[in-house]
Image (cartoon, rainbow, N blue to C red):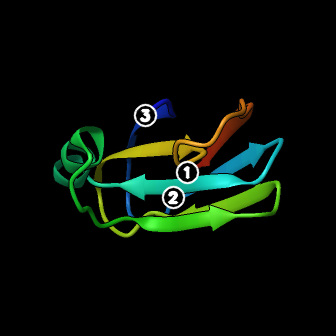
Amino acid sequence: MNYLHWKIPASKGDTIRVNKDIPAFVRLIDPLNFEYYKVGRKFASLGGWEDGQNIEFDVPYKGTFHLTIDLNGQPGTVKATIDIARL
């Protein structure tokens, strides 16, 4: 599966802002679940299908997270940027 990916060290209270150009799946995933995501296994994440261009995630705890954006195997290309607002 093709996807955009960012590895983000963050702290509780930080906000991750995503701006994308088309509807897509946008997910914030912890390291273990990201390994499951990469190999096509069932995984847990914050987020999901997002029609809007701007999405925000409040970081639930201090750690490293993976932000992914994909089209769930559908054809197309997503362009996106992220910004992190730190406390």
Q: Are marks 1 and 2 in contact (CB under 8 Å)?
A: yes
Label ID, residue 1: 3
Question: Few, some or many C-alpha atoms within 10 Å of disc 1 (few <14, some 14-19, many ≥20)?
Answer: few
Q: Helix or strand or loop: what does disc 2 sit on?
A: loop
Amino acid of disc 1: Arg
Work out how far the residue at label 1 is from the one at label 2, CA to CA, in angstroms. 5 Å
**Which residue is nearer to you in this view: 20 or 41?**
41
At horizontal 67% and vertical 35% (from top left) the residue drawn is 75
What is the quadrant of residue 71 in the picture?
top right
Badge 3 or badge 2: first in the primary sequence: 3
Q: Please name which of the two marks, 1 or 3, marks the residue nearer to the observer.
A: 3
Question: Few, some or many C-alpha atoms within 10 Å of disc 2 (few <14, some 14-19, many ≥20)?
Answer: some
Residue assigned mark 1? 86
Q: Are marks 1 and 3 in contact (CB under 8 Å)?
A: no
At horizontal 76% and vertical 45% (from top left) the residue drawn is 19
Q: Is residue 34 above or below residue 55?
A: above
Amino acid of disc 2: Asp
Q: Position of residue 53 (x, y in %)?
A: 82, 54
Residue assigned mark 2? 14
Work out how far the residue at label 3 is from the one at label 2, CA to CA, in angstroms. 29 Å
